[in-house]
Amino acid sequence: MAILGTFMVPHPPLIVPEVGRGQEKEIQKTIDSYKEVAKEITAVKPETIIITSPHAVMYADYFHISPGAGASGDFGQFGAKEVKFHVDYDEELVQEITRAAAAAHIPAGIKGERTKALDHATMVPLYFINQFYTDYKLVRIGLSGLPFRLHYILGQCIAKAVATTGRRAVFVASGDLSHVLKNDGPYGFKPEGPVYDKRIMAVMEKGDFGGLLSFDPDFCENAAQCGHRSFLIMAGALDCIAVTAKKLSYEGPFGVGYGVCTYIPKGPDYSRNFLEQFENKQKSSLADLKRSEDEYVHLARTTIETYLRTGKIPKVAKGTVFCDDDSFEGWKLSKDLLSRRAGTFVSLKEDGNLRGCIGTISATQATVAEEIIHNAISASTQDPRFPPVEKNELDRLVYSVDILGAAEMITSSDELDVKKYGVIVTKGYRRGLLLPNLETVDTVEKQIEIACKKGGISLAEKPTFERFEVVRHT
């Protein structure tokens, strides 16, 4: 059986009267919408409710599905311990989702539970649903730091598991929108906040889920949202399904956006294959990038592709890059790549997310060309934040190469500019470096903070600072 209905809902604890103590009246539209959602769920009498929660157990590279027979929780951390919940889990459906995910090469399952208690992003929806309907089991799924496309594919796996088990199921995507809508809000204001909310509601009220995949992850991070990946999983569960989409409400009086929409499936519609369409556009875009890339990026990309496919590393000699592999077509390098030495950084992105970045502050090789080759291999295989790049990822990678200018000592942060200068922070043998003009770094203070963290340095230690300029090749 197909999923009977899906619902986009927020999870502000203060919407619960015992927590809000009157403040909940300021989001009455959201309360009314929640009651309508609860009534729609009651009308179809699901055996199972599937909830995706940004506040369940979350890993960078794994989707955690809550294991066991059931779980309990309360709003004690919000001053309302008397509001309690207990749910029974649908263990059979959990097992089937895990099997479907494994078949799709999606890392998901019941391993790594850190806390059994229900989280507030799960309990807020249940607070309203339980007022009308309680005869259900639950599947609770956390989000991950994996690319957007893998969240969508997990949704496809969930839909497949529901069909395999024959469950009467509904899907609740729990997620707030931007948290930076107002200066007097709990997280302050960023211009990306209202832009994100306007854009996401335009996508969601129409059920045009392909738009979810086109959001830049860095933009989403700057908008300080928590629901985007939750909505993507829900969208995947509706892949190739026509829906009746309805916006019930949108509010943001406390500086956090709350959106409520419903989606009732109507039957197959193979024109709504949003992930396939997105990937086809992405392939075309990457092909255009490859055709227009300069020699710096071409050298980095060719190095990584050659190494991962053949295990061999290109070499430089007599002004030429070559490799002792028949499939490698060498070429003459320009004077600029051969006539000087400099520190370089090679960065990789996949689906808009950083996939690797390794570099050298100053030259370690005889030429810039050899510096790029060396750091390209490191960026794809030795960045400790990521597993090594695999061959099946190569067609989705976007490259950039930064050539560092000479570093100069500075005595004040006033001499920095996050768009123009990178920064090196040094204390003894410890050093932290951050490149300039990064999408998520918009202040000098944040730039210094991140550089210090990378070097394991505290500002209280009074480190020294250097700045440098960069020529970025994309």
Image (cartoon, rainbow, N blue to C red):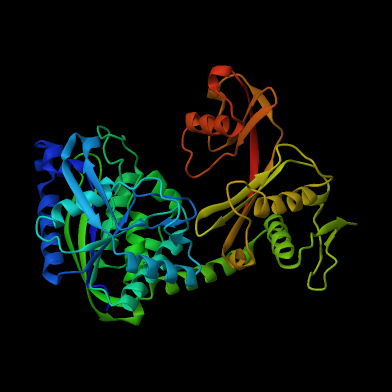
Q: Quadrant of residue 462?
A: top right
Question: In the picture shown, does residue 234 fall above or below 163?
Answer: above
Q: Is residue 394 left or right of residue 73?
A: right
Q: Residue at x 37, y 67 (%)?
A: 155
Q: Is residue 18 left or right of residue 281?
A: left
Of 438 and 234, the residue lying toward us: 234
Question: In the image as oriented, which residue stretches furthest toward the front?
Answer: 69
**Where does residue 200 sit, x and y in percent of width and height?**
30, 57
**Where does residue 47 sit, x and y in percent of width and height?**
21, 69
Question: In the picture shown, does residue 382 fall above or below 409?
Answer: below
Q: Is residue 391 left or right of residue 40?
A: right
Q: Quadrant of the N terminus?
A: bottom left
Q: Residue at x 53, y 43 (%)?
A: 438
Q: Quadrant of residue 240?
A: bottom left
Q: Residue at x 26, y 57 (%)?
A: 201
Q: Residue at x 62, y 56 (%)?
A: 399
Question: In the picture shown, does residue 286 fall above or below 241?
Answer: above
Of 141 and 419, the residue lying toward us: 141
**Where does residue 454 sit, x and y in percent of width and height?**
58, 34
Q: Quadrant of the C terminus?
A: bottom right
